[in-house]
Amino acid sequence: MKKIAYLWLLLAATAANAQTGKSLRFVNHTEFGGLFGRVKYNNPYSGNQEQVDSKTSLTIQTFNGLQLDRRLSAGVTLGMDWYKAALLNPVAGGVRYDLAGRKNVQLFGTLDAGYAFTWFHDDSEGFDTKGGLMINPGLGIKVGKPRTAAFTLALTYKRQEAHVTKTPLWDQKERFEDRVYNRLALRLGVSF
């Protein structure tokens, strides 16, 4: 399903640009940074009282696509997110759009939506972690001349799902946990 969606996106981009006679330009945007959030959970060691902790995780991603017009580029985003209990690999369709700015400093919008896999995650015995849907909208600043390499700083909201099946305890028939990672992402990158 995801491959078909990507092919449709690529086909639409090619068809939309076929009438102009311009060649499409390759675009890459590689970023790394942190995922910041607060987590509320029941602590079984304190009588199932709710506990709130701040969490910080590492993230890296690369967007590879085609420049469809002067401001819009579309493509595929691949990444790795190191959460405390899961290593997730999001694969998403992505869009980058230059909103406003001067020649050397531009404000841009970003949107990635897709699915996170667990290709590099290694579960403990009795656990089975699966990825889930992911969406990542945000804004950023690009510093550099248009159509050349530029440094970027992006602030985004990342929502990512995961499902963990656990070994049942005592009289349980099944035991699982549906996780939703809601994080504020701050990334530094380079774009060309």
Image: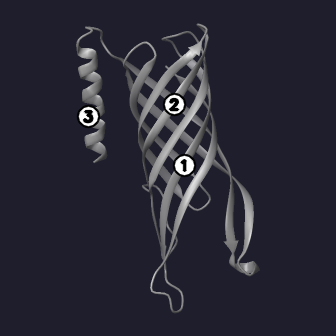
Q: Which residue is mark 3?
A: 8
Q: At label 3, which amino acid type do we have?
A: Trp
| Residue 113 picture quarter | top left
Amino acid on which disc 1 is placed? Arg
Q: Give the camera-side residue of 61 and 95.
A: 95
Name the residue located 60 percent from the left edge and 27 percent from the top edge.
Answer: 140
> Can you identify the residue that label 1 sits on?
159
Q: Secondary structure at mark 1?
A: strand
Label of residue 2 in the image: none
Measuring 43% from the left and 12% from the top, which residue is drawn there? 70
Q: How many marks?
A: 3
Q: Secondary structure at mark 2?
A: strand
Circle nearer the N terminus (1, 3): 3
- Left or right, 37 with reference to 190: right
How does the figure colour the protein chain or chains?
A: one colour
Establish if 153 lies above or below 170: above
Q: How far apart are labels 1 and 2 at the CA level?
A: 14 Å
Pick whichever of labels 1 and 2 is earlier in the sequence. Answer: 2
Number of other residues with Cα within 10 Å of mark 2, as a class: few under 14, some 14 to 19, many 20 or more: some
Residue sitting at x 46%, y 38%:
112
Place residue 158 in its image quadrant.
top right
Percent coordinates x, y for residue 23 in the rendering: 30, 12
Q: Is residue 183 left or right of residue 27?
A: right
Q: Residues within 10 Å of mark 1 (few under 14, many from 20)?
A: some
Residue corresponding to mark 2: 110
Circles 2 and 3: CB distance less than 8 Å?
no
Going by the numbered disc 2, the residue's amino acid type is: Thr
Q: CA distance from mark 1 to mark 3?
A: 24 Å
| Residue at x-position 74% and y-position 67% | 51
At which x and y percent is residue 145?
A: 56, 9
Q: Is residue 93 above or below residue 52?
A: above
Name the secondary structure under disc 3. Answer: helix
